[in-house]
Each structure stands twice: as structure tokens, then as C-alpha cells.
Amino acid sequence: MTLSASFPSEDSSGNPIDDTRRIFGGMVATAADGTPRLGVIDPDPSTPLVTGTTSMAYLIKGDETFVTQRDSSTGGVELSANDAVASVATTTAPVANSRIDVIWIKCQFDVYGDSGLYAPTFGVTQGTADASPSVPSIPTGATALAHAEVTSTDTTTETVVITQVAPFTAMAGGVVVLRNETEQAAWVPPVGSPAYRQDIDVALVRSSSGWGCVPHSKTIRRVMGATNTFTNQTSYADFPVSGDASALQMSFSKGSSDTKLRVEVTGTAQLSSGVSQRAYIGIRVGSTDYDVALRMFPAATSRENITGVAEITGVAAGSLTIKPRFKAGGASQFQLFTDDFVSYTITEVS
């Protein structure tokens, strides 16, 4: 083992480039195996990094910091930044079919074969035009920022379809932004690492068993707008008053398939006819009903609170449609009047 030179260094000959890059490699977010996460540290990840313009060029937004890896032999990285919007030209559209352009960034070092070149550069590599175009290879040590499909009818890049492909990254210990579930599944950082799912607005934390989440909740409380009557309803059903059913439905963003949903339900109802029996308020997640709250009612007429708590496992990540539903234990008539209510809270927990 050799201890690298310090950074900064008082050595008059400077710090060896491999040592500097190795130090930087330990300062950025890394996977669990220590591999640095390449990409862009973006202060505003909600806006695209690469956009089109009124000519055959691409614009790369300013105030970005890029983490790239010109040479991978030492596991080191280099950092570069642009202080304003940069424009990088491409060629005219193909005469037929379409091609894929790859917009990239590369840091250059004489020691790694970039003879006489020392400045980072943006570039575009054009693919071969085809009815089903493929992504072209980019220079060794370059990091792709975006793919753009250029058709034969495009006269400017304003009309091309641009896909952002540069991963978001961060300094060590920082929050890594993940665009979607695919990026989340591909990112395996050390236990305790934070992340943020951009598409569903959920904060995540890596655990020993996978992805956990920072607990987040959503609550709906509805006072009935009209009398909801359930007659002989021995299987779960929606609330029959459409306005109440609609108001009680929510969309909930679940950040990880490894987490649980904690559900708390409370409501009031009246057994208007029937023998002593149970009443249930369950929760439907997607197309599956789950028992949550139940109450034993004395024979009619009786009025009770129905409350319960449950934890639901095995629900996939993503945007979920959730709503409360009602069922009775046997032949009966249950009613929720205009002074009755149903309230429920969904919390994602690790």
C-alpha cells in the first residue's frame, strides 16, 4: 500500500494527477463497492441538463459540476464545472431515417494520451442513420450527458427528442437524485446513504435489506355528503355515494418495494337492521382489499366507532391508488349519515 500525496501539497513539483484524482474519488458519492458515481451535481435537477435550440446545436445549462473519469485504473475521478450555458454544435440531419447524437463531456490530460490537451471539453458524437438507429460509442473517458434522436426532417435541435442520461451524483454523504425506479434499482450505495426519487417525490435511505424511506404520510378525512347505505354487503364495496367515494380516494407515492404501508382507519356507522355482527372498513391498494378496522355491533339499532391499524407488506413501489371500502359480517343494513365520517392515514415506513 502506498499513501497518496496530500492535497494540497507543498511539493514544488505539485501533486501527481493520479493522487489528486484518487482523493477526489473518495470525496464523491460511491457505490457499496467503492466505485465513484459519475454524472452531474445539479443544483436544479428539475430542469433538463441538455436542450435544443434554433440551430443544429445543443445547449448545456450552466452552473453544473461534472464528475467524470478520464482514466479508471486508479478509481479516481476529476471534477469540472461550467459557469454559463454552453453550446455544442452537431451536423445537419440525415437525408433519410434518423440517427442518435450523444452529447458528452470529457476531461483531458496529457498523461492519459490527450497529447497537449489539458482543458475539459463538451462534444457530440453522431451515430449512423438507420430506420432503427443505435447509440454510437463515445470517446474513451467521456461521460454521456444526453441522447438526441435526429430525424431527416429536423432542421434545428428544437424538434429532436432529447433524453437526459447523465446520472445525478453528489459529494460523499450527499443526497443522490434518482429519476425513476430503474435508476433506483441500479444504484446500490453503502448502508445509510440518502437518495431522492424525483418522479414520486420520496426521500430514501439505503438499508442492509435494500431501500428504506424517510417516513411520509397522507391523510384524508371525509364527512359524508349524503347517506351511504350498505345492504347485505358481505364483501368489500365502494361507498355508494359517488361524491364521497371520489373524495375518499387518494394517490400515494411509494418509494420502495422493500418498505411497508402503515394504515390507520377510523369512522362512524350505524347498524340499522340485522343481528349482532362485525362491520369492517378496509383499504384497497390497487386491486387488493386489506382488512384494517373492525367493530362488533350489538343488534340493530346501534351506532359505533370503527377503528383499526394495519401494516401492509409486499406492495410494489410507484404511484398507488388507495381508497377505503366497507363490508359487513352478515345480512344487515349499515348506514353512514351526513354527520358520520371516515378518516384514514397511509404512512410508508421501513
Image (tube, grey):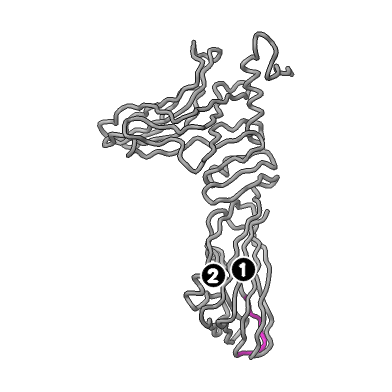
Rendering quarter of residue 175: top right
Q: CA distance from mark 2 to mark 1?
A: 9 Å
The amino acid marked with disc number 2 is Leu
The amino acid marked with disc number 1 is Tyr
Q: Name the side, left or right, on which 81 lies relative to 102.
A: right
Residue at image position (60%, 51%) is 256
The percent coordinates of residue 239 (x first, y second) are: 52, 76
Q: Quadrant of the image for the N terminus?
A: top right
Give the residues drawn in magenta, as a range: 273-280
Q: Is residue 9 above or below residue 240?
A: above
Seen as rendered, the residue at the extreme front is 84
Q: Residues within 10 Å of mark 1 (few under 14, many from 20)?
A: many
Residue at the disc numbered 2? 248
Residue at image position (54%, 29%) is 66
Callout 1: SS: strand
* Residue 96: mark: none
Q: Is residue 240 above or below residue 104?
A: below
Residue 278 belongs to magenta span? yes
* Residue 344: mark: 1
Callout 2: SS: loop
